[in-house]
C-alpha cells in the first residue's frame, strides 16, 4: 500500500507535492473541490463482487488505492481465496484469475447486442452478451458464486471439473428477473428512490 | 455484492448513523484515523456498483453509471445529508487499448461537486484523455462539458449527452445478511474499534428447495437491499465519444474511482 501511494506521488510529480503542501497548510478537514488540486484515489470499483468475495477486509484499502492493472493484492487474493477458502483446484483458481484480472469491466462498444451481459467479453460470449459490461438486471452475484463455488467454469468447458464444488454457496437464490423495481423506461433507466 | 458494500458498514440503518457519527468524529480529530476504513468514514465516496449497457433508446449510445452512498433508508432519500461529497472527485476511467492488452486509462469522465445538500450541482469534464495516467489526478479543465443539478436530468453538448446525478433505488440485489454469516470478515461492522470478527455461523445460502440432496439451507432468501437507495451518477452518450478521436469502436476496460485531495 505504501508502495502504491509513493508511486502515485511520484507520478503526480513536484506539482502534487507543492499542492499537497498548500492544502495541508489550509487546515480544512474537507477542502472544497478546486480545479487545480491534485486528487488521490481512495476508492475503485469495476466488476462487482471481486473485492468482497476474494479479498479479506484488510486488503480492500490497498486495492482501492491501486490502478486496476497494477494490483498484486487482488491478483494474488483471487488465487489464494479460490484454493484455500473455496478449496478449488489450482487450474480452476488460475482460470478465475485470468478472467477477473486486470480488475476492469470489459465492454465491447463495437457489439451490436442490444443488452449488456456481465462477463460476456471476458468469457468470449460463453456467458452474458457480446457487449459485456453490466446491465441493471444482471444477476452478477450468481454469475460470480457459480464460478467460485459451483461448476460454471467446467460447464463452459473452460477448465476440467475439479470435483470440488460447494453447491450450497453457488447461488444466493435471488434473481434479477424477479424484482420489477430494477429498471425504468426513461433515462437514467434505474428506478426512483423508495 | 460489491466490494465496497463490505466496507460500508452494512446491515442496518443504525450502522449508517454510526458511520456518519464516525465521520463527524474524524473531522474533529482528523489526524487519528488509523483503524477507520476510509470509505466508511466518507460514504459519499463509497462506490457500490458500476454499470455499462447499451442505451435502450438509441443503438448508437451507451450508458455508464456509478452508485455511491450505500444504504440510504427507504423514505429518507430527500434528507439533505444524502448528497454528493464536495471534497470528492468522481471519475469513470476507460482503457481503450485492452484488445492489445494495454489496460492503462486513456479516457476519463470526471465530475466535481459544487455545494452541499440536494441543491448542489455537479460539473462534468470529458470524455477526454486524462492529464495523468495515475491514481493521482487533476481535473481536465479544458474538457469542461457542463453542469447538472441534483436530481434534475440534463442534456449537454447540444443534446448529445444526457446526465443525471441524484437519488435512485438501489438496483443491486443480494442476500447480504446471509453472506455475512458465511464470511463475517467482510462485514465492516466487525472491523470497527473494539470489535472482533466472529466465526462463521452459516455454511450455506438460503432459499434451496426442501429435501435438496446437498442439505443446503431452505429458509427464504432475502434481498437485503430492496428498501434502500443510493446516489447515482449516470451518463448516456454516443459510443464514439468513449474512443479517442478518429478511432473505431472496440473493446474498452471500465472502472470508477473516487478521490480526495487529502487521500482520506
Image (cartoon, coloured by chain):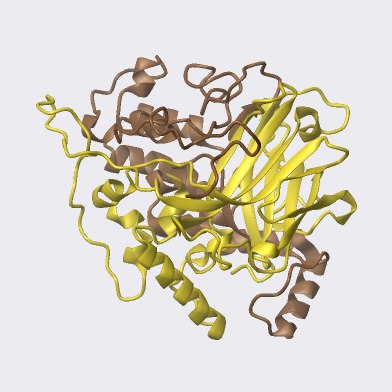
Q: Which hue belongs to chain B?
A: yellow
Q: Nearer the viewer, residue A62 or A23?
A: A23
Place of residue A29 in the rendered image (x, y in percent of width and height, measured from the top left):
63, 79
Q: Is residue B173 left or right of residue B229?
A: left
Residue A82 visible to the viewer: yes
Q: Residue at x 41, y 48 (%)?
A: A52
Q: Nearer the viewer, residue A153 or A79?
A: A153
Q: Is residue A173 left or right of residue B68?
A: left
Q: Residue at x 49, y 52 (%)?
A: B229
Place of residue B164 in the rendered image (x, y in percent of width and height, measured from the top left):
68, 46
Residue A9 visible to the viewer: no
Q: Is residue A101 left or right of residue B12?
A: right
Q: Is residue A85 left or right of residue A63?
A: left
Place of residue B182 in the rendered image (x, y in percent of width and height, measured from the top left):
25, 47
Q: Nearer the viewer, residue A72 or B53?
A: B53
Q: Which chain is brown?
A: A
Q: Residue at x 64, y 63 (%)?
A: B118
> Taking B213 as reference, is A11 above or below it?
below
Amino acid at each position: 500500500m505504501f508502495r502504491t501511494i509513493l508511486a502515485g506521488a511520484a507520478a503526480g510529480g513536484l506539482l502534487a507535492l507543492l499542492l499537497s503542501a498548500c492544502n495541508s497548510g489550509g487546515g480544512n478537514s474537507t477542502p472544497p473541490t478546486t480545479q487545480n488540486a491534485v486528487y488521490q484515489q481512495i476508492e475503485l470499483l469495476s466488476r462487482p463482487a471481486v473485492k468482497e468475495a476474494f479479498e479479506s477486509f484488510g486488503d480492500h484499502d490497498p486495492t482501492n488505492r491501486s490502478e486496476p492493472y497494477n494490483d498484486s493484492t487482488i491478483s494474488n487474493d483471487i488465487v489464494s481465496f479460490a484454493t484455500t477458502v473455496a478449496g478449488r483446484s489450482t487450474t480452476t483458481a488460475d482460470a478465475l484469475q485470468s478472467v477477473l484480472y486486470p480488475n476492469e469491466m470489459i465492454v465491447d462498444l463495437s457489439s451490436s447486442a442490444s443488452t449488456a451481459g456481465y462477463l460476456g467479453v471476458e468469457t468470449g460470449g460463453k456467458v452474458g452478451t457480446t457487449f459485456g459490461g453490466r446491465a441493471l438486471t444482471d444477476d452478477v452475484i450468481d454469475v460470480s458464486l457459480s464460478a467460485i463455488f459451483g461448476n460454471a467454469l467446467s460447464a463452459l468447458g473452460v477448465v476440467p471439473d475439479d470435483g470440488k464444488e460447494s453447491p450450497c454457496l453457488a447461488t444466493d437464490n435471488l434473481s434479477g428477473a424477479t424484482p420489477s423495481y430494477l429498471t425504468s423506461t426513461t433515462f437514467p433507466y434505474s428506478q426512483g428512490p423508495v | 455484492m460489491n466490494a465496497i458494500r463490505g466496507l460500508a458498514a452494512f446491515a442496518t440503518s443504525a450502522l449508517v448513523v454510526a458511520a456518519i457519527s464516525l465521520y463527524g468524529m474524524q473531522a474533529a480529530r482528523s489526524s487519528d484515523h488509523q483503524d477507520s476504513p476510509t470509505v466508511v468514514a466518507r460514504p459519499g465516496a463509497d462506490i457500490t456498483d458500476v454499470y455499462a449497457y447499451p442505451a435502450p433508446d438509441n443503438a448508437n449510445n451507451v450508458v455508464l453509471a456509478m452508485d455511491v452512498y450505500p444504504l440510504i433508508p427507504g423514505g429518507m432519500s430527500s434528507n439533505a445529508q444524502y448528497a454528493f461529497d464536495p471534497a470528492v472527485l468522481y471519475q469513470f476511467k476507460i482503457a481503450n487499448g485492452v484488445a492489445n492488452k494495454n489496460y492503462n486509462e486513456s479516457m476519463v469522465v470526471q465530475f466535481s461537486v459544487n455545494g452541499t445538500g440536494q441543491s448542489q450541482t455537479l460539473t462534468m469534464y470529458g470524455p477526454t484523455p486524462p492529464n495523468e495516467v495515475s491514481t493521482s489526478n487533476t481535473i481536465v479543465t479544458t474538457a469542461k462539458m457542463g453542469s447538472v443539478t441534483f436530481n434534475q436530468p440534463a442534456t449537454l453538448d447540444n443534446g448529445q449527452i444526457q446526465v443525471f446525478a441524484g437519488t435512485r433505488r438501489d438496483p443491486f440485489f443480494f442476500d447480504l445478511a446471509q453472506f455475512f454469516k458465511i464470511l463475517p470478515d467482510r462485514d465492516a461492522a466487525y472491523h470497527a474499534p473494539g470489535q472482533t470478527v466472529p466465526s462463521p455461523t452459516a455454511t450455506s445460502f438460503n432459499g434451496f428447495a426442501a429435501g435438496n440432496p446437498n442439505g443446503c439451507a431452505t429458509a427464504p432468501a432475502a434481498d437485503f437491499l430492496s428498501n434502500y437507495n443510493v446516489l447515482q451518477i449516470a451518463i448516456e452518450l454516443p459510443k464514439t465519444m468513449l474512443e479517442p478521436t478518429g478511432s473505431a469502436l472496440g473493446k474498452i476496460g471500465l472502472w470508477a474511482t473516487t478521490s480526495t485531495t487529502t487521500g482520506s
